[in-house]
Amino acid sequence: MNESSAREHIASMAKSLFDRGLTFGASGNISVRLDDGWLMTPTGVSMGGIDPATLAKLDDTGAWRHGHQPTKESSLHLTMYRSRPRAGAVVHLHSTYSVAVSCIDGIDPTNVLPPLTAYYVMKIGHLPLLPYYPPGASDLAKVVGEMASKHHAVLLANHGPVVAGTSLKDAVYATEELEETAKLFLLLRGQPLRPLTAAQTAALRAGPA
């Protein structure tokens, strides 16, 4: 995908997320890897009305070159890309149900959500919870980097998910699956759960026979 198409694709996907209530106000951010760097959504701009021409362009060192100033979470995105060379896009939201799960005391930080559905296993699989740091903090990017080589999705405590994908479509779809699974998990709180078994989960991860 060339840069012009990538700009349009980011704006379209961002508006879709906003219109469906997965992001709100000026929260959330998206980035896409290019051959010569990255495109990122600007800071302080609603994802419901992004002008493709104003997207921030970063060069292959991560330095901001033109467009509006990039999201203050740019370090999160760059950390994911540097730890995951095949990542083509990163999505970070403050989506309601995922953030709600991240605020529950006593949640398992090594794997936040049980394998409730096949699509959650296939699109997310394993979701660690990372400690709380203020948005944009350098320590936040550091802890994300420590997990990113092993996990394409992480949940930031009291903050929200960060999800990498081979393409923007894949990253968005995985983020949406995470949000729906968080919603299911909260709806089922207090009920006896019947998650997928270890054998069923392993079979899904292995793919078709």
Image (tube, rainbow, N blue to C red):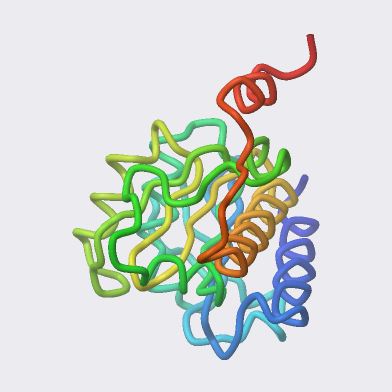
Q: Can residue 40 be seen in this view?
A: no
Direction front: furthest residue: 192
Q: Does residue 96 appear left or right of residue 81 in this picture?
A: right
Quarter of the figure with the N terminus? top right
In-front residue for pair 138/97 = 97
Q: Where is residue 144 in the image (x, y as percent from the top left)?
A: 32, 49
Q: Where is residue 131 in the image (x, y as percent from the top left)?
A: 25, 60
Q: Where is residue 31 in the image (x, y as percent from the top left)?
A: 57, 58
Quarter of the figure with the C terminus? top right
Q: Where is residue 54 in the image (x, y as percent from the top left)?
A: 63, 77
Residue at the image point whose x is 76% and y is 48% from the top? 2
Q: Does residue 207 appear left or right of residue 110 in this picture?
A: right
Direction left: furthest residue: 139
In-front residue for pair 150/34 = 150
Query: 201 above or below 81?
Result: above
Q: How many marks?
A: 0
Q: Is residue 141 visible?
A: yes
